[in-house]
Image (cartoon, helix red, strand yellow):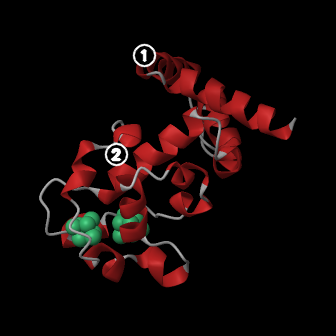
Amino acid sequence: MTKFKLVSADVIKCLSCGRCTGYCPASRVSDYNIRHILNRVLDGDTSVLTDSLIWLCFICGTCIVKCPQEGLWPPKIIQNLREYALNKGHGAWAVAHLIPAVDNFFKYGAVLKGIFPVSPKAIEEINKLGELTGMKAILEKRKKLVEESKE
Ligand code: SF4
Ligand code: SF4
């Protein structure tokens, strides 16, 4: 648990009841099992960070509604695990395909170039917001990670 304290302290509330997995759409189409992943986090199993399974959650939120434990949000824990994994240099393959879309968003104001007209002023504001929120810095970090993973 200590190794994962940044993931979410709420994970300790998990009863391992399995309701989340029972209703999880990702579990129906893959080997993804949120209950198992939470158990691994609780066990301090760091191999979960390099496991491709953490990228299979749809972040749909169904498990939040079904979980009997107030404030335990499995997709938030998954998002944090992904962030944690990326910051440790894992999972470049999972974000590589998103980079051109985010790049386009800052260049053209839309994820696809020319999909609709965006004024230069609006693009300037998008970029300012990207800087203020740290999104542009994250984009550059992810680009670097993807580049390094190709070397
Ligand atoms: S439903 Fe909630 S308490 Fe039960 S296993 Fe899933 S996350 Fe844990
Ligand atoms: S948010 Fe993820 S873990 Fe929760 S039900 Fe949806 S796909 Fe499953």
**Residue 69, image quadrant:** bottom left
Q: Is residue 60 visible?
A: no
Percent position of residue 82, x then y: 50, 46
Considering only vertical position in the picture, is 98 above or below 58? above
- Relative placement, left or right, of 29 versus 40 is right
**Residue 36, image quadrant:** bottom left
Residue depicted at 33% across the width and 38% down the height: 5
Percent position of residue 32, x then y: 50, 72
Q: Which residue is mark 2?
A: 1
Residue depicted at 32% across the width and 80% down the height: 23
Q: Is residue 98 visible?
A: yes
Residue neighbourhood size for the residue with mark 2, other residues' Cα within 10 Å, grouped as few (<14), some (14–19), many (≥20): some
Q: Nearer the viewer, residue 54 or 40?
A: 40
* Mark 2 vs 1: CB contact within 8 A: no
Q: Which residue is mark 1?
A: 132
Mark 1, secondary structure of its residue: helix
Which sits earlier in the primary sequence, circle 2 or circle 1? 2
Amino acid under disc 2: Met
Percent position of residue 2, x then y: 35, 39
Disc 2 and disc 1: Cα gap in Å?
Answer: 33 Å
Residue depicted at 60% across the width and 43% down the height: 116
Percent position of residue 26, x then y: 47, 74
